[in-house]
Amino acid sequence: MSAPEEVRPEPADEDTAAATPPRDGGGRCASGTAGPSFTPTGRDEPVAAGALAVLRQGVRASPELRRGIWWTIALACLGGAGRVAIPVLVQQVLDRGLTDGGANLGTVQSLALMAGVAVVATAVVTRVTQKRLVAASEEALCALRVKAFAHVHRLSIAHQSAEYRGRLVSRVTSDVETLSVFLKWGGIAWIVNGAIMLATLVAMAVYDLRITAVLVGVMVPLALVLRLLQRRLGDAHDLVRSTVGDLLTVVSETAQGAAVVRAYAIERRTDRRVLRAIARWREARIRAGVIGAFLFTSGELFSVLAIGGVIVTGMVLGPGAGLTAGQLVAFVLLVHLFLEPVTEFTEIIDHTQSAIAGWRKVLDLLDIPIEVVDPDPGTPLAPSPPTLTVERLAYAYQSGQAPALEDVNFTVEAGSRVALVGATGSGKTTLAKLLTRLADPIEGRILVNGIDLRDVATESLRSRLVMVPQDGFLFDTTVKDNVALGRPSATDDEIRRVFADLGLDAWADRLPRGLDTRVGQRGENLSVGERQLVALARAHVADPVCLILDEATSSVDPATETRLSHALQALSEGRTSVTIAHRLATAERADEILVLDRGRLVERGPHRRLVVKDGVYARLHASWLDVTAGASGRR
Ligand SMILES: Nc1ncnc2c1ncn2[C@@H]1O[C@H](COP(=O)(O)OP(=O)(O)OP(=O)(O)O)[C@@H](O)[C@H]1O
């Protein structure tokens, strides 16, 4: 593995190309045109939305932040006023309590008491303000995470590809996290520090207008420098957020594909890819850090210049300036109070820009339109096997891209078993996803018992029409719990009966701890075929009236193959089923076969008829026979 230092970012390398799909005019497409209207990566570059616009949108997206905010601001300003009051009280003690005739004990005592009360009250008010801020920001952050997570789940399948997963994780986790410091401190500090500086300026101007004017004069260039740097810092933080997303994408993909990486001995290439992503992230952070550091030192530098300016002006004006001893001391304290927020501002700007960059990314995610809108209330489906009618169906993942499905028409009779076959990339999975409404067609419609799928009540759709995906995703819990996900109310006996119905009871009994065997992360303790067995049991316990099945493509051992095919047959009994058939036997057993070729339905009919035609199915069948013969020859 090469050292990270040797790695240099290569903007136009293969990985960038892989991680950044071509942009199509910002990823948007006109309404009614093909495909989703957003390309997640398309927005990962700094966008034009200004910081204030992001803040406004952000607060709108997190109403928790507005709750009681005026009280918090009022308390924060009260705390600020308390801090400004101390120098004024000190001045009063010096000028009114200590006169030429000696100390005026009564005045000193009452002023000292007032100062004491001011100090305690300021501390209490500041603590209450902090508590309110922390509570409001944690509530807002939690709600924002939940909202972003829920949004990710409702996104169309075009946004759910593995390529974007890392970025989506980054949006829900680290991008939201950038808001934390800003919401707990930075946001309110803008208001409080601004108020303290204003109040201090007024107090100083009352004591001496000339010295105050010098102080302001020194600070004006700093304001210009800060403004200039702030924009650059914003861009730098935007880049940091984008590179974090890219890094998570590469790392999650590499971790998920660890077996393939090892199998093909592509560790070095994979390492290089990860290191390149790390290098891009590191460089982006360094750039943001350098600008942030420059900002901070600028604040320090101008503070020193301001103090110097005040001292020199004081000396030039001399004793004839007309300032009392108390006013002089108060003035020095006020200068200190004025400069404290100035240096703090440089830090706040850094946090603010980082938060704005993160917020922008999260808001962009929430901005991705939900294309599959739940009907309200929607029509429930009858509890009997439905007839499926597909009319002029078309779908494209991206605008401008060749459609994955085009002008597809067919009917699946109630209770019949249909096999979907076709070469890889012919559109089988896309059709299955449209049949289960993971996305809506861009043209045409799907009818279930004459009801447009878009009008079917969501709960009814999910319980009556179930999809068993190819990878049969399992959660890191027991076999029983994974099956129970199909119907959480299912009892242990019912789950055992499901395995018996599918002829899988003997297999389940042979598992190390029967149905209580843990399946590991993503079900990795089980083989691909066994995972699908559990997924079939899960579908059976849900007791749907219509099944959309995607057979596992990986070759499985003969015993599991037999179990799978028996279980599939038992599962589709008395149900309308559409199975993406990757196996000869499944296609042969179906009542009807639909043959897809480059997104179009090119043949349909029973096996015996299609196999004798000189068409796509006959060729597929011939190649299956070859593969099967080769496999049995090897055995
Ligand atoms: N998330 C996606 N974004 C963009 N294009 C996609 C996406 N998923 C699939 N496609 C494209 O849509 C077309 C149909 O893909 P689909 O997965 O439906 O084919 P398939 O017949 O199921 O293939 P296989 O048998 O290999 O699973 C292909 O050209 C594919 O590249």
Image (cartoon, helix red, strand yellow):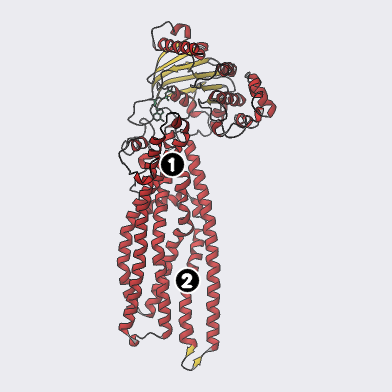
Residue denoted by label 2: 81
Q: Mark 2 touching mark 1, by CB under 8 A?
A: no
Q: Residue at x 45, y 44 (%)?
A: 171
For residue 374, above or below residue 202:
above
> Where residue 253 appears, x then y in whole percent?
44, 36
Q: Is mark 2 within 8 Å of ligand 1?
A: no
Q: Nearer the viewer, residue 512 or 537?
A: 512
Residue 557 visible here: yes
Q: Nearer the viewer, residue 61 or 15?
A: 15
Left/right placement of residue 549 relative to residue 310 reads: right
- Looking at the rendered structure, the kind of residue marked 2 is Ala
Q: Is mark 1 within 8 Å of ligand 1?
A: no
For the N terminus, the image quarter is top left
- Looking at the rendered structure, the kind of residue marked 1 is Leu
Q: Residue at x 41, y 45 (%)?
A: 244
Q: Residues within 10 Å of mark 2 (few under 14, many from 20)?
A: some
For residue 150, above or below residue 207:
above
Label of residue 248 in the image: 1
Q: Quadrant of residue 405?
A: top left
Q: Residue at x 40, y 52 (%)?
A: 356
Mark 2 or mark 1, earlier in chain: 2
**Foreground tag (2 vs 1):** 1
Q: Residue at x 43, y 20 (%)?
A: 391
Circle 1 SS class? helix
For residue 386, above or below residue 226:
above
Circle 2 SS class? helix
> Where residue 64 appears, x then y in whole percent?
51, 52
Label of residue 327 in the image: none
Q: Residues within 10 Å of mark 1 (few under 14, many from 20)?
A: many
**Where in the image, quadrant-wise, is ligand 1 located?**
top left
